[in-house]
Image (spheres, helix red, strand yellow):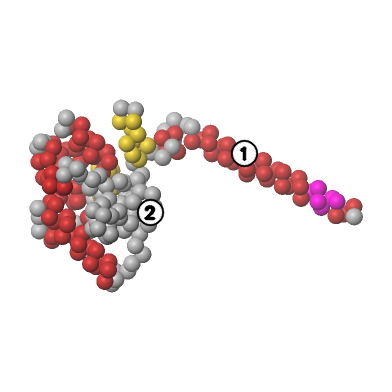
Amino acid sequence: MNSLAKQTFAGLRVLVVLTVLLGVGYPLGVWLVSRLPGLHANAEGSVVAVDGRTVGSDLIGIDPVAKDPAHDPWFHTRPSAIALDRDGDGSPDALGPADPSVSGGSNKGGFDDDLAAAIQARKDAVARREGVHPARVPADAVTASASGLDPHISPAYAELQVPRVARENGLSEEDVRALVTGNTDGRGAGILGEPGVNVLRLNLAVQAAGR
């Protein structure tokens, strides 16, 4: 009985110590580190604000919806595998907008007939919107990201959209290209991944320039 009591008290001491260290000390330490200058914004979700009003996040791509599709002033993100039914016809739009309440890919393989049809529908829709031949539409314009909420597009997809955005915002194509360059992130550590254009920040820059 004495041995059982010792083991019980030893187990309780371990439980208390680990609870304090991992249940209180570790979370508190992480929170304190997140308050350090340079880390606070990332810890809070990389929120983007304009005039004190939250407009989005650097980490989540939300495709803007034009009031008049015939006069679309926005740069657009990659399509989402989980798109909303904007027209109310029972089927999601080929290009979105995405449902921001959920994220995920389609999990369909490259030889899936439905995926092939969706990609072709997206390619045709982008080509019509930008007034180009479907062969000019880059891959990221028609393939959904793994999360479905990628905040970046390729420089090639941004370039495809420059003429339309410039025209609809009353800006020169040279000015819009300069904004694209200013909102293009380089490779991580100089070697990882490919350059990407942050669509949210680019649209905000275009909006400000067009005022």
Q: In which quarter of the image is the N terminus?
A: bottom right
The total number of labels drawn is 2
Q: Where is residue 62 in the image (x, y as percent from the top left)?
A: 30, 46
Percent of width and height locating residue 65 = 23, 45
Q: Does the magenta stretch include residue 7?
A: yes
* Rendered position, 6 above or below 210: below
Q: Is the magenta stretch mostly helix, strand or loop?
A: helix
Left or right placement of residue 177 versus residue 81 in this view = left
- Which residue is farthest top? 51
- Secondary structure under the numbered disc 1 in the rendered image: helix
Using the image, tell me which numbered label, if any, was put on residue 103. Answer: 2
Q: Which residue is tagged 1?
A: 25
What amino acid is found at the position of numbered circle 1 in the picture?
Answer: Gly
Number of residues whose C-alpha sits closer than 10 Å to that of mark 2, classed few (under 14), some (14–19) or many (20 or more): some
The amino acid marked with disc number 2 is Ser
In the image as oriented, which residue stretches furthest toward the right?
1
Examine the structure image and report whether residue 9 is included in the region drawn in magenta: yes
Q: Earlier in the sequence, mark 2 or mark 1?
A: 1
| Quadrant into which the C terminus falls | top left
Q: What stretch is highlighted in magenta?
A: 5-10
In the figure, is residue 165 to the left or right of 183?
left
**Residue lying at 10% horizontally and 36% vertically, measured from the top left:** 170
**Horizontal relation, residue 27 to residue 65: left or right:** right
Q: How far apart are marks 2 and 1 (CA)?
A: 32 Å
Residue 144 appears anywhere in the view: no
Residue 136: x percent and y percent? 13, 57
Instruction: Look at the picture and state if 135 lies above or below 43.
Output: below
